[in-house]
Image: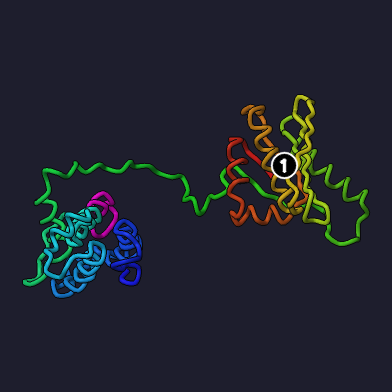
Amino acid sequence: MRKLAGSHWGANEKILKTVYQGTVRPHLEYGSSSWATAAKTHQQALYKVQNQALRIITGAMKSTPIQKMEQVTGIPPLSKRRDCKTMVQATKYQCTHDHPMSDRLKKMSLGRPKRPSFALEARALQKKHQTEMPELVEPPSFSLDAPPWEDRQGNLDIQTSVPYLTTKDEQSNATKKALTLAMLEERYPQEAWIRVYTDGSATEAVKNGGSGVYVQYPSRERQAEAIPTGLHCTNYRAEVQALIHAAYTINDRVNHDNQVVFLTDALSVLQAMTSSKLPQLERALHNINLRTVL
């Protein structure tokens, strides 16, 4: 900051203040609620840094009172900001009942002769400013049937195999097609399932991408769409955009009696879905609110 300031050139007061508040002070206040119980000699070392910054910002002499420089610049003392952060942190602990510090703030704690504990320090500050502090608001309570990290897919099933279908060249294309159609009729009959066929590709796999969507509804209605996915687009992105567009397309046309199956040949997209790497696609599929199979 001293290099930025000068008597005949350099940054003005407003810029110097912005530099201090945005660059220097965050380092001084890092973890301020935790060192609220530190010795005064340790805290004074940080106060000196702000005092030097105030003199650089205002250009005041060493004999100028610190309180006057704080009033001129509108920068509050570090001690006041530390007290505010301490009360905020204590309030967070009190609102979080399952946190160990919540019980410590409620129970009586023994303070050390020279430096009190965090609980005593926070309690004293809250008592001092009790007329200005709002009442504690209890956080809303809710329960989950299953933790989100255990049930990330919700009503979504991902399948990457077809019964009796091998990955080698032992079967002809006609055999593979017959096995796939047999699985569809057995597991996803057209009378109860919405079948969504998607595909995407790009020229030389990296440009002029495009996607296609073909939907078969239980009512025998058909719907087909072609979607451009951009000049700079890969095969992977085109496949993802096809699934996203298809999910939003059928979202307004399904009823609670139907189920949806998406048929795609993009194995890499399905693998990314299992590891939650496609949040936009997951949101689009979950908005359908029906049992969905990929």
Q: Is residue 33 visible?
A: no
Q: Main secondary structure of the magenta part?
A: helix
Q: Image check: 144 left or right of 156? A: left
248 and 166: which one is in front?
Answer: 248
Q: Which residues are the magenta region?
A: 91-101
156 and 7: which one is in front?
Answer: 7
Q: Image check: 43 left or right of 253? A: left
The vertical placement of 138 against 7, above or below, is above
The vertical placement of 132 against 65, above or below, is above
In reply to whether residue 99 is colored magenta, the answer given is: yes
Q: Image check: 154 left or right of 82? A: right
In reply to whether residue 31 is colored magenta, the answer given is: no
Residue 239 coordinates in the image, percent (x, y): 73, 48
180 and 275: which one is in front?
Answer: 275
User: Image quadrant of residue 3?
Assistant: bottom left
Q: Which image quarter is the N terminus in?
A: bottom left
Residue at disc 1, secondary structure:
strand
In the image, what residue occupies the spot 26% across and 63% down?
Answer: 57
Residue 182 coordinates in the image, percent (x, y): 83, 42
In the image, what residue occupies the spot 25% across and 41% down?
Answer: 137
